[in-house]
Image: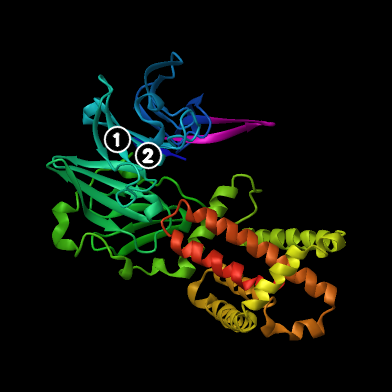
Amino acid sequence: MDIDPIGQNRILFVAGERDGDDFQRVAVLMNWRNGTVLEKFNVSKDLHDIDRLGPHRYAVADKHHNRIYVYDSQTNKTTWEYDLESHFSPSAGRGIKSADYSHLNDIDLADNGSSFVISPRNFDRVVQIDRKSKDIEWTLGKEDAYDILNEQHNPLILQQEPLTVLVADSANDRIVEYQRKNGEWEIVWGYRDGLNWPRDADRLPNGNTLIGDSLNDRAIVVTPDRKVVWEFQIERGVYDVERLPYGDEPVGPTMASQQDKFDGTIQSDRQQASNSIISQLDKSYKKTFQIVTWILPDWITLKEYGYFLSSTLLVVGWATTEFVLAFPANKFRRNGSITKVRSTIQNLRLDKMRSIFGIIGVIVGLGLIALLPISGSETTLYLGLGTLSLALGSSACDFFRTVLPNRVVVVLKGSVFTGTLAVALVLLALSMVRSEFLLQASMAFLLLLATLDVL
């Protein structure tokens, strides 16, 4: 989750170590040139960040226990500690006394070692804490103000006067640089073109910005005028990216000092192509892959995940349909309530609507598949095939009923309905926590409408 260059030869990183069935997260200080482990010690579950303060002294962002502390590896003792649950309200995060209450993902030394800057992701804010008094010195962001920060990662102080902070605003899919004047924060620069859940940003000495673009599986460098000058693809889920010559968290010039190099503080939504429906669905697809990748075998990549997801939905739908067909439902069919429901649906005169949905489904499905060479995303292929399969349930595809055996048609329609219902429910659930809730709720509603004929 974290890697820090220390000097010319050493790196500090957090890793998982497996011994049989036992799994332990460890912090490792290593000479990366010859592979010699200089120091290694156990840390808590799912630790995201650890910084070296000096010989055998480390600052730790303990995500699992919602605390930050200073650890002496030589004496194996904690010499300083700050408990977030004792200093913030339950509503600041996700449930008091929860392992993911704060989702603390970063800690950095500030003010010549007198303070710590931390990033509790679920607080949607960056906080600086005085080490001696444990008082909060300043805060960037506030509760439920997602337009300021939304599940941020890896903040970096660029300068103290005026206070300037560069931060990966992950859930807003952007990198932002904030400057505080007269107690008020304002954005002085931002980059968002095509980013997907970025989780790291460093300002290089030449004024460019190094970005870890997590769900696009890449690291990039952009200029102040937002041109990509370097890009490197990574297998999956880059979290932290550093330039070795500059050490941990390099501090380059602020964008306020480079205002002559760019226009506007940040691209508007209309300027970025990432707001298209296909792009938003692609982001949601990659986000779910990132979550479930922790429990999937290592050989499953983003491509295999699509096949895995499709086959799982098909199997679930098939099994559900077989169960329904085998269920003795005669006594339920005699119940007048089902007759009333059928009568109500028929009175809505949905025949023409179903035909229209079927035709649109075929056109959209073929269109999405045709866009595959342009988009370069296999998600377009999956969406296209999924849309075409939805069209099977419409009256526009009556020819399938004459070509295929009735039982196969029923099973296919049942599978489509069950799979679509599952997708719709997932989209509705995502709409509760993501800013694109209107898009996702609308898509879920349309998917449900497209399956009415299966009933």
Q: In this rendering, is residue 332 above or below 23?
A: below
Q: Residue 9: in sight, yes or no?
A: no
User: In x, y percent, where is residue 323?
Assistant: 82, 58
For the C terminus, the quadrant is bottom right
Residue 127 image label:
1
Quickly name the residue at label 2.
Answer: 123
User: In x, y percent, where is residue 411?
Assistant: 79, 69
Measuring 40% from the left and 67% from the top, which residue is drawn there?
275
Measuring 73% from the left and 66% from the top, which residue is drawn there?
415
**Magenta stretch: dominant secondary structure:** strand
Instruction: Look at label 2 and name its amino acid.
Output: Phe
Q: Residue 27: in sight, yes or no?
A: yes
Q: In this rendering, is residue 187 above or below 398?
A: above
Q: Is residue 131 magenta?
A: no
User: In x, y percent, where is residue 280?
Assistant: 46, 64
Measuring 38% from the left and 28% from the top, which residue is drawn there?
84
